[in-house]
Image: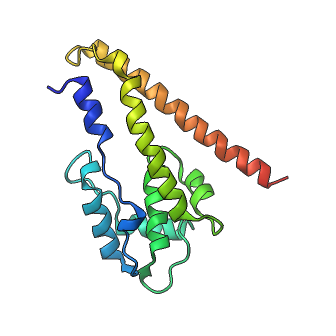
Amino acid sequence: MDTLPELIDAVMHDRDISPDQVPALDLYMDQVLTLFNEGLAQNKRHPQDKLLTKTMINNYSKEKLLLPVKGKKYTRQHIIQMLCIYQLKQVLSLSDVKALVGRTDVDFESCFNRFLDMKDRLREMIPSELADYESIDLTDPNQVLTFCLALSAAATYMQRLCQHVIDQRAQSSNP
């Protein structure tokens, strides 16, 4: 069984697709799916998991989370927008995701690059913040439950903070 520091290290080494890895050419849906499912394969919890599907892309388009598609090809802007959706949908409702990415006034590439820089800083910060918990016995169901409850609370605080930021923005843009 892995130790807590080994588990932390494993989750902190997820993969990202940076904007400079997105082809300059427009891609067909199957090419977009391949880019995501191969480029982010390391992020899957189970090997059979799909990170992005045709149905998901169609739903994002239908719900206006994506800029309108011209023809059957997706631009760099669309793909980077989908990368943003992929990140945000882990913790936010689709309506919150739409409030952030269903817009035409956002420079998705610049935002995503800055996000990757912030994520790198979090990868450095989080393990040291969890160092106090390294003595948790991962074979003890009571300690595992307690630790997972604490992690869940931390995730909930972050989710709520994000929701409040979205709500603040909505209030300030609707006087």
x and y percent of residue 147 in the render?
36, 19
Looking at the image, which is closer to me, 115 or 139? Answer: 115
**Which residue shows up at 51% across the image and 70% down it?**
61
User: In the image, 148: left or right of 160?
Assistant: left
When the figure is inspected, residue 97 is found, relative to residue 144, above or below; the finding is below
Q: How is the image coloured?
A: rainbow
Which residue in the rendered view is the most extreme toward the left?
Answer: 1
Question: How many marks on residues?
Answer: 0
Q: Is residue 126 visible?
A: yes
Q: Is residue 89 visible?
A: no
x and y percent of residue 7 in the render?
25, 31
Looking at the image, which is closer to me, 166 or 18? Answer: 18
Q: Which picture quadrant has residue 57? A: bottom left
**Which residue shows up at 49% across the image and 71% down it?**
77
When the figure is inspected, residue 66 is found, relative to residue 26, above or below; the finding is above
The quarter in which the N terminus is drawn is top left
x and y percent of residue 92 in the render?
52, 46
x and y percent of residue 33 in the render?
32, 68
**Which residue shows up at 44% across the image and 37% down it?**
122
Looking at the image, which is closer to me, 94 or 117? Answer: 117
User: In the image, 86: left or right of 97?
Assistant: left
User: In the image, 129: left or right of 134?
Assistant: right
**Which residue shows up at 41% across the image and 22% down it?**
149
Which residue in the rendered view is the most extreme toward the right?
Answer: 175
Q: Which picture quadrant has residue 105? A: bottom right
